[in-house]
Amino acid sequence: MENYIFKDLIIGATSQVAQYMPAEILRISSRNIPEWVYEKEWNRVYVCFAEQRTAYATNNNYRDLFYNINVGLVLQCVKKIKSKKIIVFSTTELWNECSGAITLDTPFCFKENYYTESKLIMTTECKKIDKVIVVYPFNFNSIHRGEVFLFGKIFSSIKNKTLIEIGNTYFYRDVLHARYVAKRITEVKKDAIIGSGRVIYINDYIRDLYKGFNLVYEKYVKEDLNNKNTARSIFWLKSAERQYTYENLLIDSMKDIKK
């Protein structure tokens, strides 16, 4: 790898989005970044790693993990690496208490926890650096999503035909597949929110996935509706056109599971 034949670099080789990016981009782990990476001058560097297990975002035992990775390690990479452009991942969760369509000009409004706070600090610092492009993707999923996440469970259940238990999914959200996010970040030339421009009903999407594989939703999914927290804010990317259709979301998701 030290022969410097690669022009672009992904830091976060095991991240979801890295699995769908062009094969000609060099991938390295964020856990052990060799010094020669900082000596080379790159064209574009994609910082794809993060601590995003939001299930632990209010657990004090994980506080340092969120800040050390999302702030400390990301900023270390950004400040030390030599590159024309560096693409870093923020999150649309910084608007998770907004209602309606959002743009980059929409003031942040979010529920505070270790995940959102660490992302805010990182984002604020990165926006001060000219060579950095900050992208804000809506929630995206794939077969590479861990089972601590809802769609990690869903994809695994369909693929392995196993029974799972999930919480309340009767709500609307702007949702993407990692393949679309990978495509968009290789195209961006300035800060951008990555979304479809529309919301979908999450339970319908899940049921359509099971139906697409001739599986009966009720046979494989046990719902725990004791937590009826459906009063979450509904927000989406402001766009006159649909950026990513529901049909493409289903196609990409089913193609992923079949693979």
Image (tube, rainbow, N blue to C red):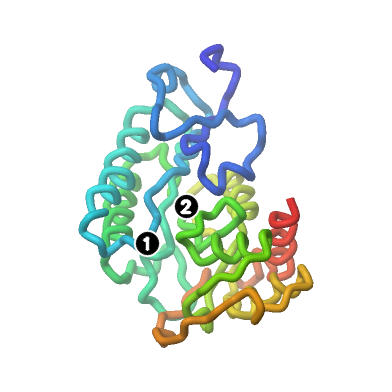
Of the residues shown, which amino acid type is indicated by label 2? Val
Above or below: residue 248 compared with residue 180: below
Residue that badge 1 annotates: 54
Q: Earlier in the sequence, mark 2 or mark 1?
A: 1
Q: Is residue 70 left or right of residue 212?
A: left
**Residue drawn 41% across and 37% down?**
131
Task: Give the structural element (helix, strand or loop) at label 1.
Answer: helix
Image quarter of residue 60: bottom left
Q: With respect to residue 31, does 195 lie above or below?
A: below
In this figure, what is the number of numbered marks?
2
Camera-side residue of 237 and 200: 200
The spot of residue 215 in percent (x, y) is 74, 73
Q: Position of residue 142 (x, y in %)?
A: 60, 56
Would residue 212 be found to the left or right of residue 156 on screen?
right
Disc 2 versus disc 1: nearer the observer: 1
Which residue shows up at 54% across the image and 55% down it?
145
**Number of residues whose C-alpha sits closer than 10 Å to that of mark 1, classed few (under 14), some (14–19) or many (20 or more):** some
Q: CA distance from mark 2 to mark 1?
A: 19 Å
Tell me if residue 253 comes above or below residue 30 in the rendering.
below
The residue under the point 42% across, 17% down is: 36
Please name the residue that numbered disc 2 is placed on. Answer: 135
Crowdedness of circle 2 by 10 Å Cα count: few (<14), some, many (20+)? many
> Residue most toward the top?
3
Q: Give the quadrant of residue 30.
A: top left
